[in-house]
Amino acid sequence: MTRTSYLRRTVLRAGYGLTDSHGAGTGNNGTGVSPGQLGFNAAASFSSTVTGQPAFYWANGVPPYQKPPFIDPGYGVGFTTASPSGAVSPTYVNPATGAKPPYSVYWNIGIQREITANTTIGASFAANTGHFLTGGGGTGIWSNSMPIQCLPLGALLGAQATAANIASAQALAPGIGLPFSNYVGTISQMLKPYPQYSGINYLWSNRGNSSYNSFQFAVDHRMSQGLTFHIGYVFSKELDDTTTSRNPFDGSLDRAPGAIDHPHILTGTVVYHLPFGKGHALGSGNAAVQRLVSGWLVASVVTFSSGSPLAISGTGCVVTGISSSCLPSYNPAFNGPVRINGSYGDGNILAPGPVAYLDKNAFITPAPYTFGNLARAAPYNLFSPYTLNEDVTLREIALRKRLKLTFEANMFNITNSVIFSAPGTSIDSTTFGQVTSQRNLPRKVQFNARLSF
């Protein structure tokens, strides 16, 4: 084979692209809050002063009314002697990030080779990154959390800000004090960046980031001898930080595999026209039999996907004054396997005495006034059960002049395999590590026929 002919049967492809979602900082963005509620416009109301007469005449212009913004220095001010429980959670939109649309950058490079006139193989690398995505932690002062340096105050954080308690707190953290003279509330509330508010409703922060990298392999066989098939395999990794973080001042701590991370995906499709009837090697000489056995095909789709990463959680974290999601810690005294009792679903999964497939001893609730150190997702490389779809279609088309009969049988989950859902992942739940449901459906067969004329 000459070099020229070899190159003619090989193709190299590459691509690069960028997409964004314009207007991410406008409208209500799914939050239920419109720009008008942020003080950017006002719905003026005019009423008729005389029954049966209009409120005003267009020819005379719109009557005067108060125009926004409406500035009220005392809006929602609580935690004071005058209003000890009147605090609100005002809405805030950061002008630097609120109008930034999320965007993604894509690139790929691949090679495809023709092995025979009907068969090709290919391999490629594909990746993308996303920025300014919805969600993401690390909102800092806009979470209205006190500085994490104040956590060593411990139980004092939940105590009322009396003179004695403030003096005890100042012994541990010199320089702290009342935010205003008539403050009434706890010491943790006193230390927040906006102590007069119970919280900050931070809209459209768009702080999330993601990355995806994959190697993709494929084998394709075009129609030949009645057979067409495709086999594809993807090995990938997805990371993001689009969930609420344990530390509102450092969202990078929770960059981890996301819910859409499935490291291994294998797909296969095949269509085979059965070699029966007129014109085939297994044809029949009888015309009636030919019409009966001709036109049959079998098609199948099989998809295997490894499970998504497990996210272990807890409810016992104590970080008074911090807006935080609770993640447990690794148990430093644990040295055994975390996955126990065989494959998911082995043994008894029903009460009484259901089997747990994760060892709770691998995790502990973090010490009070500290953050858990567990990875946000896939600690100990824990993933949920894989998924498997096995579907088959049997189809026949019988032709006779203008009359056509189509018969079809569809079989889903043909092997009647049982795929279990992810086990419980809250270390404070009685069902931790237990499988309580089935993810897929049992075998199902559908028959249908259509007559066309």
Image (tube, rainbow, N blue to C red):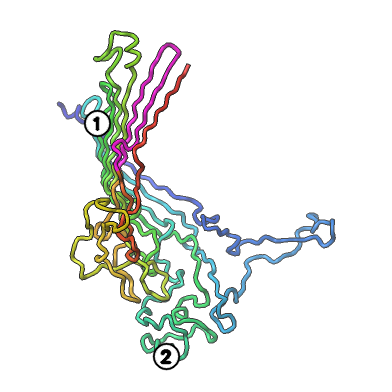
Task: Tell me which amino acid carries mark 1.
Answer: Thr
Residue 176 locus on image (x, y percent): 43, 85
User: Position of 280 compared to 398: left or right?
Assistant: left
SS for dot 1: strand
Which quadrant of the figure has residue 172?
A: bottom left
Which quadrant of the figure has residue 239?
A: bottom left
> Any mark on residue 167, and which?
2
The main secondary structure of the magenta stretch is strand
Residue 129 locus on image (x, y percent): 35, 52
Outermost left residue:
1
Task: Tell me which amino acid carries mark 2.
Answer: Ala
Q: Is residue 447 above or below residue 428?
A: above
Which residues fall within the magenta stretch? 388-417
Which quadrant of the figure has residue 141?
A: bottom left
Callout 2: 10 Å neighbours few (<14), some, many (20+)?
some
Q: Is residue 263 above or below residue 184?
A: above
User: Position of 436 compared to 164: left or right?
Assistant: left
Q: CA distance from mark 1 to mark 2?
A: 77 Å
